[in-house]
Amino acid sequence: MLYIRMLLIMAVNLYTSRVVLNALGVEDFGIYNVVGGVVAMFSVLSGSLSASITRFITYELGKGNEESLKKIFSSSVTIQIGLAFLIIILAEAVGVWFLNDKMNIPDSRIVAANWVFQLSVLTFVINLISVPYNASIIAHERMSAFAYISILEALGKLAIAFFITISPIDRLVFYAILMCLVALCIRFVYGIYCKRHFEECTYHFIFDTELLKQMFGFAGWNFIGASSAVLRDQGGNVVINLFCGPAVNAARGIAFQVGNAVNGFVSNFMTALNPQITKSYAAGERDYMMTLIHQGARLSFYILLLISLPVLVNTSYILAFWLKTVPDHTELFVQLVLVFAMGESISNPLITAMLATGNIRNYQLIVGGLQMMNLPVSYILLRTGSFPEAVIIVAIIISQCCLAARLFMLRGMIGLSVKGYLKKVYINVLTVTVLSAIVPFLIASRLEDTFVNFVLLCCLSVACTGLTVYYVGCNKTERRFVKKKIYAIRNKISKR
């Protein structure tokens, strides 16, 4: 269900990006992207608490403590409501000043940009209050419900792509209004589903000092990691705006939409895997948890490689076919964002394992501290005249430094074997990547950008990746498992 959801959402996102870009124009699309990014920077406050909520709900489910689960859910909703008010105050006090006095926005669009900012804050707050409900669905592993609600959200965004072309008011403002309305509808759907299916999801005001102390203590240290990720992504976007203008923000925005669409396949996989890692830790099943970490990291990477390689080989043709107007820098941005996503994918199970322990202070100080270097390094490079894509290159390099730090930290926290991880995961995925990419890139360099060649290169890329993953990336046990599934599917089809 998660992959059916992802295919639909990816198709909708790619189509709506094209429609919205053409309806708004490059400049307004860039303005929406960067103004929304300023609002998203306030997730530095919400992200740490959201991770805390998800961890505590999943952990208590693993222990089977129903009463504690009810207290955690109600406390989580109380925390998110309080945080929503805090973010509104900060947004109005700091965000409005930064938008009007510091950002590179044409005078003729500053009024529309302010409307977008206010609506983006409201959308952000609505999504913030949905976090405990979303976390409950994932913790209970009701992936079909999560998929259905996400599909409903995607259909809402598809409707927006239609309505924006017949907007009765300023299109940029109308787009922000519609995005806010979709977020509000999805918030009500989450609330109704959770109240009907999960006993703990009935809110009562609870002020449990000890529980709040634990959750805020966890969130406080996780704040470092959350803030470093936001500063890397949205801070980099703002830095690009300061030195390069909204047109380059549009190119980066398109690249990240492609990256998010492709990365969604891994997000689906990790959405299903994360509760298992946390629950296995809570139940004391350490060997099973290690197996999940190794296999999860490799499979996450393989999924991304399978989807990303055809895009990397055909980036120029895909962008020209997809968009009527392709902003400068978009092609290299897309390729670098996909490389970054693949590099990050093998860290996701490690991050989940770290959060499961609850002992995250030293981890966040070291890994979060490394990630925070993204913003100052990017600022210095752009200020000295570097090309805008340097922001993503910096993120890729620091991402690998963070991976090394995670491995050495988790060796002490959960007994992770660094040597075993490097052999079973890192060297494995590097080998598979090189062997998969050689033939498609060699042939692509000799072909022109035509539809027939595009189809040929996509098929070739998928075939090379699939065969390499099967024969090089998988061990004997995994190959037997794949064969067994293939035979089972074939027998079902033959019986029909």
Image: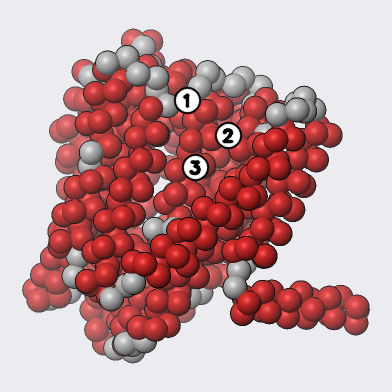
Q: CA distance from mark 3 to mark 1?
A: 19 Å
Q: Residue 209: x percent and y percent?
A: 8, 73
Classify 10 Å Cα crowding around label 1: few (below 14), some (14-19), many (20 and above).
many
Mark 1 vs mark 2, CA separation in Å: 11 Å
Residue 412 numbered tag: none
- Residue occupied by mark 3: 339
Specify whether residue 111 is in view.
no
Q: Is residue 33 left or right of residue 151?
A: left
- Residue ID for mark 2: 17
| Residue at image point 83% right, 80% down | 492
Report crowding for label 2: few under 14, some 14 to 19, many 20 or more residues within 10 A (C-alpha): many
Element carrying mark 2? helix
* Quadrant of the rendered image containing residue 360: bottom left
User: Which residue, given by chain and number where applicable, does mark 1 sit on?
Assistant: 250
Circle 1: residue type: Ala
The answer to which of marks 3 and 2 sits earlier in the sequence is: 2
Q: Amino acid at mark 3?
A: Val
To which quarter of the image does residue 356 belong? bottom left
Residue 374 vertical position relative to residue 263 in the rendered view, above or below: above
x, y percentage for residue 407? Answer: 31, 62
